[in-house]
Image (cartoon, coloured by chain):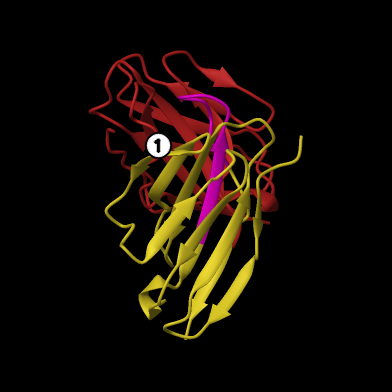
Chain colours: A yellow, B red
Amino acid sequence: DTGVSQDPRHKITKRGQNVTFRCDPISEHNRLYWYRQTLGQGPEFLTYFQNEAQLEKSRLLSDRFSAERPKGSFSTLEIQRTEQGDSAMYLCASSLLQGQTQYFGPGTRLLVL
Amino acid sequence: DAKTTQPPSMDCAEGRAANLPCNHSTISGNEYVYWYRQIHSQGPQYIIHGLKNNETNEMASLIITEDRKSSTLILPHATLRDTAVYYCIVRSTIQGAQKLVFGQGTRLTINP
């Protein structure tokens, strides 16, 4: 059973550029979650999917953020017009069923210059 | 989800048992206690979870008090690789309560 994978692991971009991150969940996990973690803080929930449906979005997910999971497998998180405040670790997790344990990927560390 | 309170930091000698406390005095009947840890620059790693009874797996033991208002994660023989931030999370499993709410966690340092 391969774990959750994320790509890229690191991304440096200039302010105003768009970035896209990918998450591949554990095979057959139908729930997929995105979290963000800034330095010194615990992860904060952004959004989650059940299969291809996006069921909940945090207020942290501004208009510049969009997440998709078109075929119910991998997911992408796009940030448009990046700002320095978007610099953080973006974490993806997946779980098999409602209420089941979430397993996290290694994260994508974003630095906006 | 209920809030949790953990000490910000702890130290433990290598080879000894590390006991990490967590207070969750407002926990409700349908909420589980989950423990994750995060080693520097990695994603959180699931350790263990429980509802009422004590639980043990290959990584750790979880002791939950009878009133469920607090719990202790026990790493029986700590190694240097156990140095990490440990998060205690109370999570409901009812419909619509899907997210994990992380606090600041406990930074555990294992000393040689």
Q: Nearer the viewer, residue B24 or A27?
A: A27
Q: Which residue is mark 1?
A: B89
Give SS at disc 1: strand
Residue range corresponding to the magenta coloring:
A90-103
Q: In the image, is B17 to the left or to the right of A37?
A: right
Residue at point 39%, 48% (across, down): A45
Q: Is residue A29 visible?
A: yes
Label 1 marks a residue whose chain is: B
Residue at point 44%, 73% (across, down): A87
Say whether residue A94 is magenta: yes
The amino acid at mark 1 is: Ile
Residue at point 56%, 79% (across, down): A12
Q: Is residue B34 above or below residue A11?
A: above
Residue at point 31%, 42% (across, down): B5
- Percent from the top left, x then y, of residue B102? 38, 46
Q: Is residue B61 above or below residue A68?
A: above
Q: Is residue A107 visible?
A: no
